[in-house]
Image: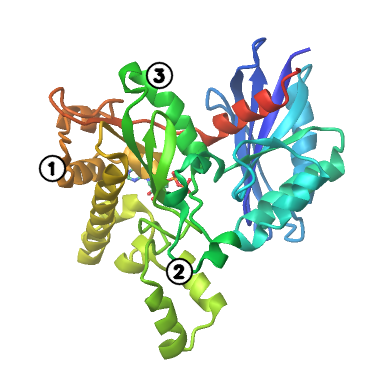
Amino acid sequence: MADAVLTINAGSSSLKFALYRLDDDRTPRPALAGEIEGIGNEPRMTAEDAKGQKLVERGWQDRGMDHRAFLGVLDEWLRGQLGETRLAGVGHRVVHGGTAFAAPVRIDAAVLARLEQLCPLAPLHQPHNLAGIRAVAASRPDLPQVACFDTAFHRAHPELADWFALPRRFHDDGIRRYGFHGLSYEYIAHALPAAAPELAQARVVVAHLGNGASMCAMRGGRSIDSTMSFTALDGLPMGTRCGALDPGVVLHLIRAYGMDADAIEAMLYHECGLKGVSGVGNDMRDLLASDDPRAAQAIDLFVWRIARELGALAAALGGLDALVFTAGIGERSPAIRAKVCELAGWLGVALDPAANRAGALRVSSPGSRVAVFAIPTDEELMIARHTASVLAPA
Ligand code: ADP
């Protein structure tokens, strides 16, 4: 009987899922993918097969149904889809693996307890990730589960890159730079040498530009440094997050505006970035289409910060051989790629405008000293690969 693995990415009001059938050599092949969104409000489930054919579209009126209830719905629905295929395990995206987890891990009670202790470090994501794991464990206790971490890929950082210059005891307590979007970067670390084998040992900066946005410096496919750090707020301005901020601003908000931690957290995560600066919204497509000067300014700020971080990460690498754009904006916006590359000309970046507009894989000109790529990321596939390999029979 053939095996399959399911990937789950559990957020505060959504469950993204994807099913992969495993080849004889345990290579995952996409079978279907979907999402249950609006949990607690107006829940809706959609899924498509690998060819983009709609498999289900369904809504519920019941606001009381929680993640556990919907994992039950998903389990039931998947049984119908699986046919003769056996579900061999579930791989979960888990935002934080702390300092202990530098690789995916099979989940047991002890692992779950350690992941629980990391909830204060990622309060907006980790509890939802773990709720998904617990819900599967409750309904299918025999089904193996694997945790795949957003932080793990960055555990390869040189130690110095993970220090804040705070008193040492805080570092020892875990207040250090971790880095996120690791599953996306790890995918690119495999996809880039597959597309350009000569870059296998190269100095590469990857710009993951989605609603969440960060950049990672890689050498030889290993992470050296990244723009996100203790939380997913640091680094670039994002759709609704502020990016790097003088900590003195936070102190000022407390003293001069009387804001408390909850109010500041809500503002920094949900009201800043492209949305805050433009006053138009967080969707890059809307900003690019807008003739509001504030939208243009938000785009310019986003690009400016990317260009500055690119310089910093090139310094961390001691030079730059390749630049990779990925995630929603990086993959699909020739305009943003062009603006970034223009500011990066001093590094030896030269774009091929026609290739960039056409959405080619390699978008730099033949004479560019730095090779530039636009590569679609696939975090789900990375989770499926990890899950298949962690669960592989010895
Ligand atoms: P998430 O971080 O939520 O996974 P995505 O990687 O899906 O985000 O990226 C979402 C972002 O990509 C949004 O800002 C959206 O506007 C942007 N985007 C998607 N398609 C395009 C496009 N064709 N041009 C510009 N931006 C785009």
Dot 3 corresponds to which residue? 194
Horizontally, residue 369 falls left or right of residue 70, namely left
Residue at the image position 38 percent from the left and 77 percent from the top: 249
For this rendering, which residue is in front, 270 or 80?
Answer: 270
Which secondary structure lies at badge 3? helix
Q: Residue 301: give x, y in percent of width and height.
A: 25, 59
Res 57 visible: yes
Q: Is mark 1 within 8 Å of ligand 1?
A: no
Q: Amino acid at mark 3?
A: Ala
Disc 1 and disc 3: Cα gap in Å? 28 Å
Q: Amino acid at mark 2?
A: Leu
For this rendering, which residue is in front, 158 or 361?
Answer: 158
Dot 1 corresponds to which residue? 346
Say above or below: 52 vs 314.
above
Residue at the image position 53 percent from the left and 36 percent from the top: 379
Name the mark nearer the viewer: 3 or 2: 3
